[in-house]
Image (cartoon, rainbow, N blue to C red):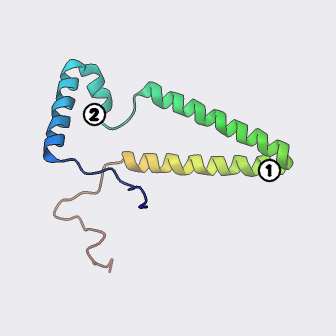
């Protein structure tokens, strides 16, 4: 028995053309939805729901930690959740920044050049 592939199978050219045509027709039929999904981000309402569910899960974890491990356990879980949220926020801000300049004066990080 072979393990399942971790990546989706590659589409044939005919399948890709069919998919492109279907996407084009859907975008023409529902232009308001096409704008929401073209950037690869879910609509604002869905992001809000996800945030609410994650916040509720975080509160439940803190309460469970308080019951099982007392105040110290709750504090440990709270600190862990805060650190995770900080990392996610930092990555989100970093991803929102424009990329490095690719002009003539810009150096690539993998170019092997040293700072001296």
Separation of marks 2 and 1 at Cα, in angstroms: 43 Å
Name the residue located 19 percent from the left edge and 30 percent from the top edge: 22
Q: Residue at 31%, 49% (x, y): give it.
A: 98
Closest to the observer, 111 or 17: 17
In the picture, the quarter occupied by the N terminus is bottom left
Q: x and y percent of residue 15 in the render?
A: 18, 41
Frontmost residue, 79 versus 23: 23
Q: Quadrant of the C terminus?
A: bottom left
- Is residue 1 positioned above or below 79 on the image? below
**Where in the figure is residue 112, as x and y percent of width and height?**
28, 78
In the displayed structure, would residue 85 be above or below residue 53?
below
| Residue at screen point 51% across, 28% down | 48
Q: Residues within 10 Å of mark 1 (few under 14, many from 20)?
A: some
Label 1: element kind: helix
Give the number of callouts. 2
In the displayed structure, does residue 66 sit left or right of residue 102?
Answer: right
CA neighbours of label 2 inside 10 A, class few (<14), some (14 to 19), many (20+): few
Tags 2 and 1 touching, CB below 8 Å: no
Give the labeled residue for mark 2.
Answer: 38
Residue 72 percent location from the top left of the image: 82, 51
Q: Earlier in the sequence, mark 2 or mark 1?
A: 2
Q: Is residue 12 above or below residue 17?
A: below
Q: Residue at x 80, y 50 (%)?
A: 73
The image quadrant of residue 5 is bottom left
Query: Which numbered marker is on residue 20?
Result: none
Q: Which residue, given by chain and number where applicable, does mark 1 sit on?
A: 73
Residue 85 image offset from top left, x and y in percent:
58, 46
For residue 14, side relative to residue 71 (left or right): left
Q: Does any portion of residue 71 appear in the rendered image?
A: no
Q: Is residue 82 left or right of residue 40?
A: right
Nearer to the camera, 60 or 80: 60
- Horizontal side of residue 49 vs 67, given as left or right: left
């Amino acid at each position: 028995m072979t393990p399942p592939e971790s990546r989706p199978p590659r589409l044939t050219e005919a399948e890709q053309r069919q998919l492109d045509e279907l996407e084009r027709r859907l975008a023409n039929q529902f232009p308001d939805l096409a704008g929401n999904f073209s950037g690869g981000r879910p609509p604002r309402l869905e992001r809000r729901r996800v945030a609410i569910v994650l916040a509720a899960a975080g509160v439940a974890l803190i309460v469970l930690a308080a019951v099982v491990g007392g105040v110290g356990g709750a504090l440990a879980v709270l600190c862990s959740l805060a650190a995770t949220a900080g990392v996610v926020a930092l990555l989100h801000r970093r991803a929102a920044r424009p990329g490095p300049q690719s002009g003539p004066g810009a150096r690539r990080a993998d170019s092997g050049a040293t700072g001296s």
